[in-house]
Image (cartoon, rainbow, N blue to C red):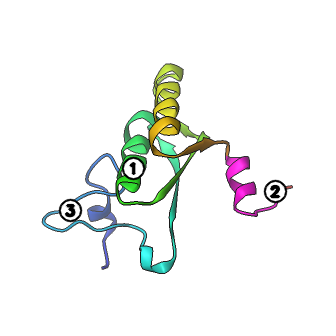
Amino acid sequence: MQITATEAKNRFGSICAIAKREPVFVEKAGQIDTVIITGTLTEVCCDSTARGAYMRDYKVMFDDDATGGLSEEAEQATFKAMSMFFGRVASTEATLAEMGVVTA
């Protein structure tokens, strides 16, 4: 399914219902099983995207140093909830290492 940029993000999460259809932005048939979360706002859009991915049976990797929130307290609360219920929270460096990417 082809989705335009305007259609792709009409809710807080990147995985969202559009009109009467519900596209998933990464196809599981393409062997993708993990969604890496980066961006802003940690406690709104990133959180919503992570939860949406988890609810669709994707593994979630939430990069705590590659997201930005309104406050340190809001970010820490989101990281705690993510790590307890929805996925793994770690640094970008740890995520890249887990993926086998060598950084200089």
Q: Is mark 3 on a helix, strand or loop?
A: loop
Residue wearing tag 3: 18
Q: Tell whether label 1 touches label 3 (CB within 8 Å).
A: no
Query: Which of 64/31 is in front?
Result: 31
Quadrant for the N terminus, please. bottom left
CA distance separating discs 1 and 2: 27 Å
- Judged left or right of residue 65, residue 3 is left
User: For mark 2, does the 10 Å Cα neighbourhood hold few (<14), some (14 to 19), or many (20 or more) residues?
Assistant: few
Mark 3 or 1: the one toward you: 1
Which residue shows up at 50% across the image and 20% down it? 73
Q: Tell whether label 2 touches label 1 (CB within 8 Å).
A: no
- Is residue 50 positioned above or below 26 on the image? above
CA distance separating discs 3 and 2: 38 Å
Quadrant in which residue 43 is drawn: top left
Magenta region includes residue 98: yes
Residue wearing tag 2: 103
Q: What element carries label 2?
A: loop
Mark 3 or mark 2: name the one nearer the start of the chain.
3
Mark 3 or mark 1: name the one nearer the start of the chain.
3
Magenta region includes residue 96: yes
CA distance separating discs 3 and 1: 15 Å
Horizontal and vertical percent for residue 10?
26, 54
Residue wearing tag 1: 49
Q: Tell whether label 2 touches label 3 (CB within 8 Å).
A: no
- Judged left or right of residue 23, residue 37 is right
Task: Point out the stretch of residues depicted in magenta.
Answer: 92-103
Q: What element carries label 1?
A: helix
The type of residue carrying mark 3 is Ile
Horizontal and vertical percent for residue 9?
31, 56
Mark 1 or mark 2: name the one nearer the start of the chain.
1
